[in-house]
Amino acid sequence: MAQIQSNDSDSGKGGKHGKVRAKKQSTHIDMTPMVDLAFLLLTFFMLTTTFGKPKTMEINMPVKPPPGQEIKNEVNNAITILLSGDNKIYWYYGELKPETKLTLTDFSATGIRKLFLDYNKQAVDEIKTLKENALKTKMNEDTLKSRIVDIKGKKYALMVLVKTDDKAKYKNVIDIIDELNICLIGKYALVDLDTREYDLINNFQPGQ
Amino acid sequence: MPKVKMPKNSPVLDMTPMVDLAFLLVTFFMLTTQFRPDEPVVVDSPSSISEKILPDKVMLVTIDSSGRVFFNLEGKELRKNMLGEMSAKYGVKFDENETNRFAVMATFGMTVQQLKQYLPLDEMERKNFMKKSMGIPYDSLNNQLGDWIRFGRLADAQSSNGAPIEKDKALRFAIKGDANANYTAIKRVIEVFQEMKVNRFNLVTTLEQNPTTN
């Protein structure tokens, strides 16, 4: 089509002038529609895209013992954390005895974190010096990691048992596991609540 | 007084750099984008300091704030196999069309019996259906969640044809709970997993600043 048309116009004008003069046109094209489109696409992709994957926290649960066999938890240096509604944390140290009293604390840096850091002081200090040494001696990252795991598993490192009642929220559990990671506690377990502990929570009085 | 003459400027401005930039960004987003999967429920995951990234191949169990449970496993062939096993166990027949629709579906949460009614629906109707749905039953009497997990794993094992799977490509199990869900619901889901001899989980969280102690 274009070919034929140009031939026609040639025969019309070309007879007189012999030369076709190109029309002088502005070099500016109206780019507005293109820009509109570009920004439309840009907005679309910006809104639908998800950057990065969600983060996850890995957790290993102990293998369930076959029925009839109970696993005895060794509670030499252990804190038991009882999570309840309204973001409340109750805790006691050591084994559950008839005279055991609960203490109430909260999720703030001066609450549960201070508690963990105090009880886990030896391990925390040790890991701290280990990290400083590692910086000086340029220790291999893998060896550093395995050394830290070693310290976390030592006998003097704190062990934490986390128990939840029926009012605790998922967020509380995640927060506690977070605190455990922050305070470099490697030995922890999510355990079922004892009925005696349940009673202790229910009969808890603030002044205790 | 003489009139102040405004300098006459051309109203046309050179948009080329702007267009360049716009197209650069468009190209960037087009190449990096991963479409956000359509989630049937809004789940507000809790935040943690963990920086681990969710693995690619996961079986995802979602728990919303009222304790309803949803399930997702990606992969068309896997899903077809899984649905076949479920249909055999619960005696609910799915024709080919329904199976294909199931294969491309995202997260779902209803009983197998309801799934049959859910599959032919369109997008809007599905949303309404999900609002009324009670989620996948996971109590010990009617443990359909456990069956989805079992058949999902079976389908996954079949898909590799017995070839050993590389460690980081193995199927992982993720739990995405709402921050305000009761922990008892999550505990029960973990129990269901443990009954299937799964003891290692990824809990989906969002990132939060680490208040370093050292």
Image (spheres, rainbow, N blue to C red):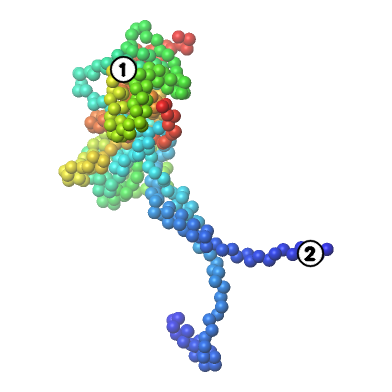
Q: In the image, B95: left or right of A57?
A: left
Give residue B86's position: percent from left, percent from top.
24, 40
Q: Which mark is residue A16?
A: none
> Going 44% across and 16% down the picture, which residue do you hit?
A104
Q: Residue at x 35, y 39 (%)?
A: B53
Amino acid type, residue under disc 1 in the picture: Tyr
Whole-percent x and y of residue A52? 39, 44
Q: State the image coordinates of residue B70 (x, y, percent, origin top left).
A: 35, 37
Badge 2 element? loop
**Which quadrant of the view contains residue A91?**
top left
Residue A10 visible (yes or no) = yes
Q: Residue at x 28, y 31 (%)?
A: A143
- Nearer to us of marks 1 and 2 is 1
Chain under callout 2: B
Nearer the observer, A199 or B87? A199
Residue tagged 1 = A156
Task: Indicate whether A82 appears above or below B13.
Answer: above
Q: Quick one: quadrant of the C terminus of chain A?
A: top left
In this view, which residue lies farthest toward the top? A99
**Which residue is situated farthest in the right direction here?**
B1
Q: Which residue is mark 2?
A: B3
Q: Visible in this render: residue B130?
A: no
